[in-house]
Amino acid sequence: MAFNIQNFREAMQYDGQRPNLFRVTMPTKGAIFNGTDLSLFAKATSIPGATLGTIIVPYFGREVKMAGNRTFPEWTITVINDETFAVRSQFENWMDHINSHASNTRKAGSGQGAYTNTAKVEQFSKSGPSTAITAVYSFHNIFPTDLSEITLDWGDNDVVEEYTVTFAYDYWIRGSLNQSSGYGKQATAITTKTGSISS
């Protein structure tokens, strides 16, 4: 194929997706978790990968590979800590409802429907969330499994504390932009070379 930079420019007419244009959201879950401030303080995460298992069947000395089941790895976010511990205290409370520190018991009424939640990662176009959401990934039946430590050090100047939260979940779905997300903004039309995405 001949080198033609114009073909590349046409294919990249929106200059590529930026990794810093995103928002993490998680709805409030009764008395267990208040997700109001999470979108302000969740500073890093990832779009999930996809893994399909492989079934290997030996046949006359050869390995025949067949598609197996899908697995979903844990998902992690990095959160900025403010002086009120607004978000961290919510994760501590959530995990305490699942299994308390002292009594090793679950809070009454905290069944699976109560302690699992739905998280979303929304990616925005460079014109901002009010104009277009370019992708939405939702994590279903999610709950925290690890709340990382926060290191304290007299020598750490001009930095803000942060920590990570790791979650287990059943599955993720890349949402259709023409369906209601239940919360968060909807995408408006984005015309592309091959078609359009519309709300």
Image: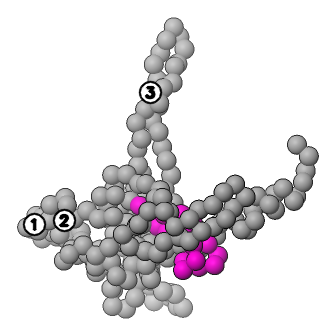
Q: Quadrant of residue 71?
A: top left
Q: What type is the residue that disc 1 sits on?
A: Gly
Residue 1 in the image, given as x and y percentages of width and height: 88, 43
Q: Secondary structure at mark 2?
A: helix
Q: Residue at x 52, y 18 (%)?
A: 63
In this figure, which residue is indicated by the disc labeled 3? 55
Task: Let me know if residue 108 is in the magenta part.
Answer: no
Q: Nearer the viewer, residue 47 or 189?
A: 189
Q: CA distance from mark 1 to mark 3?
A: 41 Å
Q: What type is the residue that disc 3 sits on?
A: Ile
Specify few, some or many for label 1: CA neighbours under 10 Å numbering under 14, 14-19, or 20 or more.
Answer: few
Image depth: mark 3 or mark 2 in front: 2
Q: Residue furthest top?
A: 60
Q: Which sits earlier in the primary sequence, circle 3 or circle 2?
A: 3
Q: Which disc, if any, is residue 5?
A: none
Q: Residue at x 45, y 19 (%)?
A: 57
User: Contact, CB < 8 Å: mark 1 with mark 2?
Assistant: yes
User: Contact, CB < 8 Å: mark 1 with mark 3?
Assistant: no
Q: CA distance from mark 3 to mark 2?
A: 36 Å
Q: Residue at x 90, y 54 (%)?
A: 4
Q: Quadrant of residue 143?
A: bottom left
| Residue 147 seen by the camera | yes
Q: Which disc, if any, is residue 114?
A: 2
Q: Find the magenta span and give its range.
A: 121-138
Q: Quadrant of residue 106?
A: bottom left
Q: Secondary structure at mark 3?
A: strand
| Residue 146 seen by the camera | no
In this figure, which residue is indicated by the disc labeled 1? 109
Residue 165 in the image, given as x and y percentages of width and height: 38, 68
Residue 120 in the image, given as x and y percentages of width and height: 42, 66
Q: What type is the residue that disc 2 sits on?
A: Ala
Specify few, some or many for label 2: CA neighbours under 10 Å numbering under 14, 14-19, or 20 or more.
Answer: some
